[in-house]
Amino acid sequence: MAPSKIVECGGQCTTNPRTGGVLATIDQDGFTIEPLDPSAACTPTSVAAHMLYETVDPFRMREPAGTLVVTDATYTALDDRRVRVEGSRFEPAGQHTIKLEGAPVTGYETMSFTAIRDPHILAQIEEWVALLHEVLAGRVRQTLGLGPSEYAVDIRPYGYNAVLGDIDPAAGPPREVGVMMLVNAPDQATATAIARSRTR
């Protein structure tokens, strides 16, 4: 494993990732890694497992200049805090490559938040969300002249069915639910107008 890969993430290769950075001592044959915090430790497992972090393949990691290969790497505990890594190698690429990531503008968003404590609504929250979609679509069509394909609305009830889903042993509706409505439209004014139309 290349020391740059492991040092860059600091305490991720230690028994306590929250304790901070690590110190790598590099030589011709490999490197030794140890945590800076005396309460943490590097172990062969914690160091080797770092190749599972942010990589597709636990034995090969592609970089712009080539590939880091750890198939033959060894991880040896020098004591209860330090690990010696040897046997990793770097295979230079025939051509440098860089991965570029980007995203186009897909619209503008407005968020609206509210909370529900009405037991009648909470007893049928799914039907209420469906009705809100229907009513909102009608109001947007009537007031703004927009069809469903010209904008997007996502209504998310928080505090309802969020963790256990259908296997929740609790019976009855929740006491309260927070609702976020997220509207996406081609421009900010339209997104805001759609979000406001639910209250008209």
Image: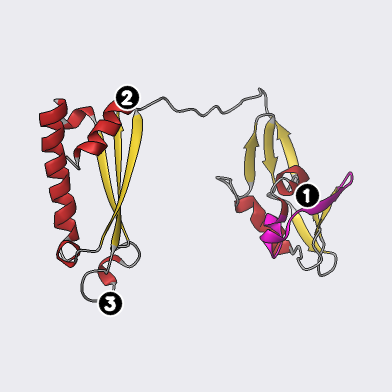
| Residue 12 drawn in magenta | yes
Around disc 3, counting alpha carbons within 10 Å, would you say few (fewer than 14), some (14 to 19), or many (20 or more)?
Answer: few
Q: How far apart are marks 2 and 3 (CA)?
A: 44 Å
Q: Answer yes or no: do the residues labelled 1 and 3 have beta carbons within 8 Å?
A: no
The residue sitting at 27% across, 69% down in the picture is 175
> Any mark on residue 169, and which?
3
Whichever of callouts 2 and 1 sits on the residue coming sooner in the sequence is 1
Q: What stretch is highlighted in magenta?
A: 11-29
| Of the two numbered discs 2 and 1 in the rendering, the one whose residue sits closer to the viewer | 2
**What is the x, y in percent for residue 34?**
81, 58
| Residue 130 drawn in magenta | no
Q: Mark 1 sits on what residue?
A: 87
Around disc 1, counting alpha carbons within 10 Å, would you say few (fewer than 14), some (14 to 19), or many (20 or more)?
Answer: some
Q: Distance between the residues labelled 1 and 3?
A: 53 Å
The residue sitting at 29% across, 37% down in the picture is 183
Q: Mark 2 sits on what residue?
A: 187
Q: Quadrant of residue 168?
A: bottom left
**What is the x, y in percent for residue 85?**
79, 54
**What is the x, y in percent for residue 132?**
16, 47
Give the answer, above or below, for where 171 lies relative to 112: below
In the foreground, 47 or 188: 188
In the foreground, 189 or 150: 189
The residue sitting at 29% across, 61% down in the picture is 177
Give the answer, above or below, for where 15 lies relative to 134: below
Q: Quadrant of residue 81?
A: bottom right
Colour scheme of the picture: secondary structure
Indicate the secondary structure of the residue bearing disc 1. Answer: loop
Image quadrant occupied by the C terminus: top left
Check disc 1 and give the amino acid type: Gly
* Residue closest to the far right: 27
Check disc 2 and give the amino acid type: Asp
Q: How far apart are marks 2 and 1 (CA)?
A: 55 Å
